[in-house]
Image (tube, helix red, strand yellow):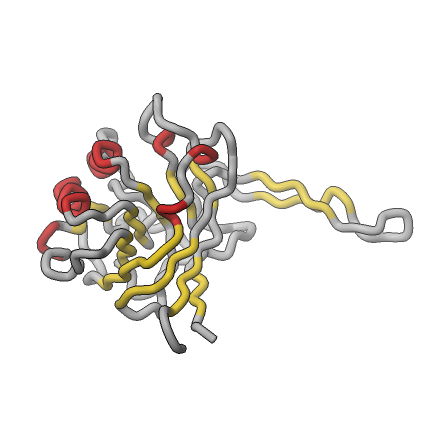
Amino acid sequence: MRRIYDITQPVRTGIPVWPGDTAYGEERVWTIDPPCPVNVSRLTLSTHTGTHADAPLHYDAGGVPIGDVGLETYMGPALVLHLPSGLERVEVEHLAGRVPADTRRVLLRTYDRFPHEAWDSRFTAMAADAIDWLAGQGIGLIGTDAPSLDPETSKTLDAHMAVRRHGMAILEGLVLDGVPEGVFELIALPLRLSTADASPVRAVLRSIGEA
């Protein structure tokens, strides 16, 4: 058996969300009792709740919604890299010499311990130059344990615009605690939300070869 790492945030009441975004809510609308055989719940949440995939529509008014993105990018070998905690931005210097030529997906761990209980406004963002450099190495998907590639206060979204230029895919809010550096099989499929700008995902990594 190959080892599986669940790199998804637990979605629950109180999960930290982007300031001003929709809080997660869960309401039981049907409950098992003598006249009812099932439990059924109503969910209220942002498309960017927890671990999620951004669609081009999120940062491009003419971009495709998440229900129309190709799925191949979200499955396959992915390189996990550990970066020093506390960085303001990931720069080219943090990546150069660490990405093998055949790499197509990169997942960046920037937290020593993921902040499950509170929102962190000082998360590590990505420099647009670093995204340009990754695209030049053939990377098609960038994943991060931060909630965004751009700083919380950014209005220009330079990192997202770099992703847009190169037609790359984005995963944000990954939980990479306990995952060593190396290459794993990534599976992180977004829901087929036909007109949405993003989707929560259940993201897992599976070891390649024997456990």
Which residue sits at x=14%, y=44%?
136
Residue 18 in view of the camera: no
Q: Nearer the viewer, residue 6 or 26?
A: 6
Where residue 112 sits in the image (x, y, percent)? 29, 65
Q: Nearer the viewer, residue 205 or 117?
A: 205
Indicate left or right for 34 with 2 as reference: right
Indicate left or right for 73 with 46 as reference: left
Which residue sits at x=49%, y=37%?
22
Q: Nearer the viewer, residue 186 or 201?
A: 186
- Label tally: 0
Indicate left or right for 119 with 47 as reference: left
Which residue sits at x=45%, y=56%?
9
Q: Residue furthest top?
A: 62
Examine the rendered structure and indicate whether residue 151 appears above or below residue 209.
above
In what quadrant of the picture does the C terminus appear? bottom left
Q: Residue furthest bottom?
A: 211
Q: Quadrant of residue 156?
A: top left
Indicate left or right for 108 with 129 as reference: right
Residue 44 in view of the camera: yes
Where residue 55 sits in the image (x, y, percent)? 38, 35
Where residue 71 sits in the image (x, y, percent)? 42, 44
Q: Nearer the viewer, residue 66 or 178?
A: 66
Examine the rendered structure and indicate whether residue 169 appears above or below residue 79.
above
Where residue 36 sits in the image (x, y, percent)? 85, 48
